Amino acid sequence: MNKTGLSITNKILILLSINSKEPKSTEEIVKLGYQFGLTAAGKWNISQHLRSTGGKAIKTPKGWELTLTGIQFLYLTFGVEIDSQEIHIANDLRSHLPKIKNQDTLAFVTESVLCLESKLYRSAVVLSWVGAIAVLYDYVIVNKLKEFNIEATRRDPKWKNAKVTDDLSLLKESEFLDILENISVIGNDVKKELKKCLDLRNSCGHPNSLVIADNRVAAHIEILVLNVFAKFI
């Protein structure tokens, strides 16, 4: 930790990596510094250093935390290993970005990755869902439009045949998923899991007292990656 050439900012980031799941106050970071022989830690303006990291750390109500960008930086620069499900999910989602041709969909998915990396969990849930449903809309328009319109009309004789993705968005998303199952685009079990994702998206998209953390968000995005992005792009 006292390695010559290691900046104060990087020393503080490394201290944050200790028990990285636990947010830390500036006082707690100073105490960790003392434990590792950083006797000057009490003189550092820790908050200023962390605010200057370009998003490698963020201040939450419970204290300072590393973002996924910070975790990846410490691993690539100093070999500090922090096992994080969020990193794997973010990387999986990023791997699909080059395949997305629709620029609007690409924007939603890209922003969902950035939100996940910045621990903006509710935003990550909402944007990843919007991206996933947009992928499904595009798939239907290109591959299953006739079958979709037939089933939609069977359910609602007043349905006007869809021609573009905006037409599909007139349906409730839960009903859209029901039709996808009926025309064999997705199976029943996949539909059930996607509806759970939709429920979480609805909860995260409205003001309420719901609190979610990394594991729940990672599970949500993993379902979308495995059952939508990996299959329909």
Image: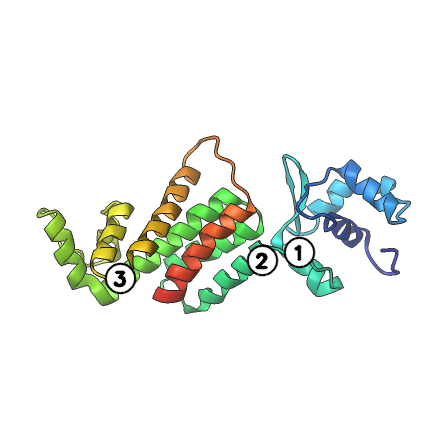
Looking at the image, is mark 2 or mark 3 earlier in the sequence?
2
- Residue positioned 45% across, 68% down in the render: 98
| Residue sticking out furthest to the front | 189
Name the amino acid, label 1. Ile
In the image, residue 25 above or below residue 177: above
Looking at the image, residue 173 lies above or below residue 26: below
Residue on which the image places disc 2 = 87
Q: Are marks 1 and 2 in contact (CB under 8 Å)?
A: yes
Which picture quadrant has residue 147? bottom left
| Residue 224 placement, left or right of 186 | right
Q: Please, what is the three-letter code of the amino acid marked with disc 3?
A: Val
What residue is drawn where x is 51% and y is 52%?
218
Give the distance between the C-alpha atoms of the residues marked 1 and 2, in whole angstroms: 8 Å
- Crowd rating for badge 2 (residues with CA inside 10 Å; few <14, some 14–19, many 20+): many
**Can you identify the residue that label 1 sits on?**
71
Residue that appears at 72% across and 51% down: 17
